[in-house]
Amino acid sequence: MYCLSNRSIAYLDPGNICSDLHCGAVAGYKLIWLLFLTHALGLYVQTLSARIGIVTGRNLAQHCHEQYARSIRIPLWLVCELAIIGSDIQESIGTAIALYLLFGVQIWAGILVAALLSYVILGIQRFGARKVEALFIAMIAIMCACFGVEVFMSSPDVREITKGLLIPRIPASATVQAVGIVGAVIMPHNLFLHSALVGTRRIKRAADVRHASIREANFYTTLESGVALLFSFAINATIMIVFADIYSRGNSAKSVHMAEQHLPGLVEAADLLRGAFGDLGPLLWAIGLLSSGQSSTATGTMAGQYLMEGMMRLRASPWLRLFISRSTSLVPTMLVGVLFTSRLDQFDEWLNVLQSLALPFALIPTLKLAQSSHVMSEFAVGPRWRAFGWLAAAVIIALNVYLLLPLIVDLASYGVAAACMALALLGMYLLFVYILVASKVE
């Protein structure tokens, strides 16, 4: 159950909530299918990463240390650490905005309070896994209740919801939001986390019972992941549906145009909910947002711990790890919170894009290890699932490049030097992806 609650929370952080809000505002119900597909893909890659841990007894980060040379391992670690820091920033922003909505605390002060609260959450782990499990389950229940009540208070168009779920389409104005969904749902550091969480399972590795024991563990892990992601999809979908309903009222075309020109933020979302449902709407929103921000702190800390120890053999206590991560993320978060308060949500959206850009650097090692018969023996992924995994990786990389190309064109307006630098960074990105794909797993 501890693994189950952690897997649910990993897909319910403030970055997800911000992504759902923007998708509902800009695209209405049209991206529900992508949200579902991304959760299905999340189940697939999460299952692969967990199976690596179950079959081999070592997590993904430890395998990366063994399989990759130092020249590959260090940049791989740095990219994944950057993704964790980005997630920390989103958690701080989400918590700070929730405190502002509930108690009127200034954003910069809320960011400091969020940093302190993260230590409280970590401290509860000293009382045992059951206490942490109960806390996580309570926070998930709070999010389900808060966001669930709001969708029942709204009057969504069931027919449009069905069309949004069954008919694949991405509006031209929602490209950034579509890529952001992928990064918000499938965060790269979660693959390292899930491959390590299964280490708490007791697996019999004696020759006569090993195969049956591993098959049983794989089955129940997949079942747990499926249930966790079903909860995650339901909560994320309710948020998207609520704001799609709000923006579809009155002059739909005008509302969507306004959302495209200025994306609603987490604070503005509370005002929208007040207008639609009265004072109860923003109260439920703030409580759910606070639960989301604080519950996701523990998963980021644990993922960073496994990543640091496994890939780089650097050992640090969870307290020190949290201090380093929070201190690193505190500076840019405070700068945005003090100087660019009106840009907080745009900043949050691009952090989701950062997660998508970093995803191939966790996904490719996962795919290569899972398909290796040398590493996974008889539990290696079969040809069909292998093809599906590489197709999904190719689509994610293509979406990332598609999103980056307009930015490069915009940078070209600042001169040849800026354009050359942007193209060089894109070339380095694709080169590193190629190196990971071409590297042999033995």
Image (spheres, rainbow, N blue to C red):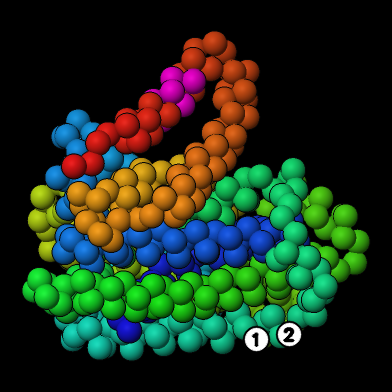
The local secondary structure at tag 1 comes to: helix
Q: What residue sits 80% from the left and 76% below the top?
A: 158
Quarter of the image that includes the C terminus: top left
Q: Nearer the viewer, residue 33 or 185?
A: 33
Q: Is residue 238 above or below residue 43?
A: below
The image quadrant that residue 194 belongs to is bottom left
Magenta-drawn stretch, dominant element (helix, strand or loop): helix
Q: Is residue 404 magenta?
A: no
Q: Which mark is residue 149?
A: 1
Tell me the amino acid under the disc marked 1: Val
Circle 1 crowding by C-alpha within 10 Å: few under 14, some 14–19, many from 20:
some
Q: Is residue 421 above or below residue 45?
A: above
Q: Nearer the viewer, residue 286 or 60?
A: 60
Q: CA distance from mark 1 to mark 2?
A: 6 Å
Q: Nearer the viewer, residue 377 or 31?
A: 377
Residue receiving disc 2: 153
Q: Is residue 214 above or below residue 83?
A: below
Pointer 1 with pointer 2, Cβ within 8 A = yes
Estimate the x, y position of residue 369 in percent, counting from the top left.
28, 49
Estimate the x, y position of residue 74 in percent, counting from the top left.
21, 37
Q: What residue sits 23% from the left and 56% below the top?
A: 376
Q: Which residues are magenta?
A: 423-429
Estimate the x, y position of residue 228 in percent, counting from the top left.
45, 76
The image quadrant that residue 441 belongs to is top left
The image quadrant that residue 166 belongs to is bottom right
Q: Nearer the viewer, residue 376 or 27?
A: 376
Q: What residue sits 62% from the left and 83% below the top?
A: 148
Tell me the amino acid under the disc marked 2: Met
Q: Is residue 405 above or below residue 59?
A: above
